[in-house]
Image (cartoon, grey):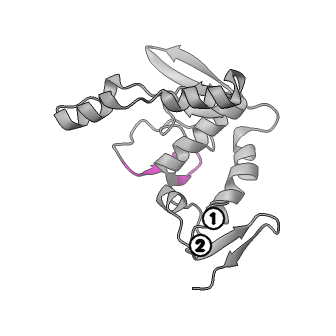
C-alpha cells in the first residue's frame, strides 16, 4: 500500500484557524495503524514531488500548471483531472519504483518501468478503467466517448449504475 508522504511545514498560512487545524491533526496515525495491521514491508511512503505535474501516460513534465484543475500534456495530448493524474502517478511509483535525479538544482523523477514502455502500459492498464467509468465506483456514465472522468465523480458516486464485478458489467439501478 502506498501513502503520500505529507509535510505540514509548507502548509501554514496567515489564517490562525487554518494553522491550528493543521497543527492539531495527527497525520502519521493512519500510517501507524496500517503498519500495525499490514506490516512495515507492505506500507510504503511515496515522495509526492511532481505527482500532479508529470504526465502519468508519457512522463512529460508540465511546468506551467498555474493552479488549473485539468492537466494538459504537451507530449501526448492527454487531458485529465490533476488529482486523478497525481493518484495514477503515485500508484505507478509504488508499483514500479522510481529514481530521483538532481540536475542544475532541480529534482527530476523517473519511473523504472520494465518490459513495455510507460505509454503502452498506461494504454493497456489505466485507460480501460477510465473509458468505461471508474471501476467499482458506480459513477454515472456521462457519454459513450468520454475519455476521462473527473475525480469528483469517482469520489462521490451517483447511484444510477452499479458494478457487478463477477459479470464485469454495469447494472441499472431502478429509481
- Measuring from the top left, give residue 147's x and y in whole percent: 59, 63
Using the image, tell me which numbered label, if any, was put on residue 141: 2
Q: Is residue 95 visible?
A: yes
Using the image, tell me which numbered label, if any, was put on residue 42: none
Q: Which residue is mark 1?
A: 133
- Alpha carbon distance from label 1 to label 2: 6 Å
74 falls in the magenta region: yes
What's the residue at 55%, 29% (across, down)? 31
Q: Is residue 72 visible?
A: no
166 falls in the magenta region: no
- Measuring from the top left, give residue 85's x and y in whole percent: 54, 46
Q: Decide which of 173, 26 is in the foreground and name it.
A: 26
Q: What residue range appears in magenta?
A: 68-79
Q: Is residue 85 above or below residue 15?
A: below
Q: Decide which of 70, 7 is in the foreground and name it.
A: 7
- The mark that comes first in sequence, 1 or 2, is 1
Q: Are marks 1 and 2 in contact (CB under 8 Å)?
A: yes
Label 2: few (<14), some (14–19) or many (≥20) C-alpha neighbours in 10 Å: some
What's the residue at 82%, 34% (across, down)? 115
- Measuring from the top left, give residue 150's x and y in whole percent: 50, 59
Whether residue 89 sits left or right of residue 115 in the image: it is left
Amino acid at each position: 500500500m502506498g501513502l503520500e508522504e505529507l509535510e505540514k511545514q509548507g502548509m501554514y498560512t496567515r489564517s490562525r484557524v487554518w494553522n491550528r487545524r493543521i497543527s492539531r491533526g495527527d497525520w502519521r496515525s493512519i500510517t501507524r495503524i496500517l503498519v500495525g495491521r499490514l506490516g512495515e514491508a507492505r506500507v510504503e511512503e511515496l515522495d509526492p514531488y511532481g505527482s500532479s505535474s508529470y504526465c502519468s501516460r508519457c512522463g512529460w513534465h508540465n511546468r506551467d500548471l498555474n493552479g488549473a484543475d485539468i492537466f494538459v500534456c504537451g507530449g501526448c495530448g492527454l487531458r485529465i483531472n490533476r488529482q486523478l493524474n497525481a493518484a495514477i502517478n503515485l500508484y505507478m511509483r509504488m508499483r514500479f519504483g522510481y529514481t530521483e535525479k538532481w540536475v542544475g538544482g532541480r529534482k527530476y523523477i523517473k519511473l523504472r518501468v520494465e518490459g513495455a514502455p510507460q505509454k503502452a502500459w498506461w494504454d493497456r492498464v489505466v485507460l480501460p478503467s477510465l473509458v468505461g467509468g471508474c471501476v467499482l465506483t458506480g459513477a454515472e456514465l456521462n457519454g459513450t466517448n468520454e475519455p476521462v472522468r473527473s475525480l469528483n465523480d469517482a469520489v462521490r458516486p451517483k447511484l444510477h449504475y452499479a458494478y457487478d464485478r463477477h459479470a464485469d458489467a454495469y447494472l441499472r439501478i431502478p429509481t
